[in-house]
Amino acid sequence: MATMLNQMAVRPLSDALGAEVSGIDVSKIDDPTFRELRDIFHDRLVLVVKDQDLSPADQTAFARRFGEIQYHISPEYLMKDQPEVMILSNEKEDGKFIGLPDGGSEWHSDHSYVDQPTGYTVLHAIKVPRDGGDTEWTSMVRAYDSLSDDMKRRLGGLIGTHSFNRLKNSRLTVPVRHGNDPDYYKRSPPDSYHPVVRTHPATGRKALYMSPRFTIGIKDMDDVAARSLLDELFAHINNRAFVYRHRWTVGDLLLWDNRATIHLACGGVPEGQHRRMHRTTVLGEIPF
Ligand code: OGA
Ligand code: MN
């Protein structure tokens, strides 16, 4: 059988992470091409696959090749007939948002607030605004590698506390749209605990695993000391040399590895312009 591998073209997107892949159709990808794509992905951590024309069912089937689907904890914006796909959108119908309008507006790794967080996220661009709506990723492998040896030693064995609950995170405010809904944070799952330095199961590389959105403390460390350590680490991570910024085009399929990156929805979409993404997440391992 002919393989797509010969048609696949790859180019790096930034020094730290990211690769753009063209010449393939992920809904028809054969096994050797898939394995090569996954190896490139594990190396570059973010993949941009251009020009994909995928139904939600196609996207789900492709995501399943990486593992088990992870369903979002809140059912509100899952597609009715394809609940593996969550809609991110600022569009409204009958005065109500048809998708999550402000997902990812602080740096985070997906679902780090549960015991078994997301391995991979697959995001497909359906509608792209003329202005704004970019997304950024930071390589947490680069962030870890560039720490001092002393800091690496200090972090060995530390466990971070991750919480979905914004009320527990002094770095954050609660979005206005939840202000009048006291039940919203009761839906918050229990906090989870993960090593602050984790090892990638496929490559063995070490990465920092923490984020301003979800990491609220360090287990068995008092709040003042934990706050100061996290401040220092977040300042270190905040370095443009570790970042890839994506300007979306309709049909882009983005894949990212949540075990070794954090990401940010940059926002800035003007009123009246529409952005719609279809999102599928693949369950990862328990971080180690
Ligand atoms: C996500 C996410 C960012 C964006 O889908 O997990 O954070 O720019 N998306 O839509
Ligand atoms: Mn996200």
Image (tube, rainbow, N blue to C red):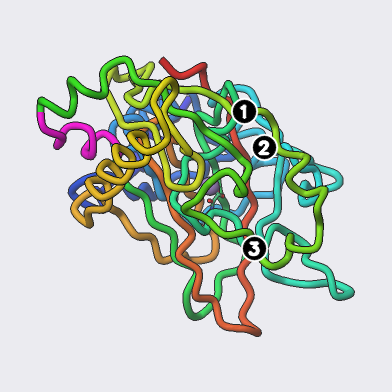
Q: Nearer the viewer, residue 131 or 112?
A: 112
Residue 142 counted in the magenta span: yes
Residue 113 counted in the magenta span: no
Q: Which residue type carries mark 1?
A: Arg
Classify residue 63 by image quadrant.
Answer: top right
Q: Residue at x 38, y 60 (%)?
A: 246
Position in image of residue 84 (x %, y %) = 72, 38
Position in image of residue 194 (x %, y %) = 46, 22
78 sits left or right of 100 in the view = right
Asked whether the beta carbons under mark 1 and mark 3 sit within 8 Å of each other, the answer is: no
- Is 105 situated above or below 141? below
Q: Nearer the viewer, residue 260 or 85?
A: 260
Q: Which residues are magenta?
A: 140-148
48 sits left or right of 169 in the view = left
* Sequence-earlier tag: 1 or 3: 1
Residue under label 2, please give it: 60
Q: Nearer the viewer, residue 195 or 98?
A: 195
Query: Residue 175 bears which disc, if any?
Result: 3
Considering the whole magenta stretch, tell me its main secondary structure: helix
Q: Residue at x 42, y 20 (%)?
A: 220
Position in image of residue 76 (x %, y %) = 81, 49
Question: Disc 1 beta carbon < 8 A from ligand 1?
Answer: no
Within 10 Å of disc 2 (Cα), the crowding (few <14, some 14-19, many 20+) is: many
Q: Quadrant of the C terminus?
A: top left
* Sequence-earlier tag: 3 or 2: 2
Q: Secondary structure at mark 1?
A: helix
Structural distance between the alpha carbons of marks 1 and 2? 6 Å
Structural distance between the alpha carbons of marks 1 and 3? 33 Å
Query: Residue 64 bears which disc, if any?
Result: 1
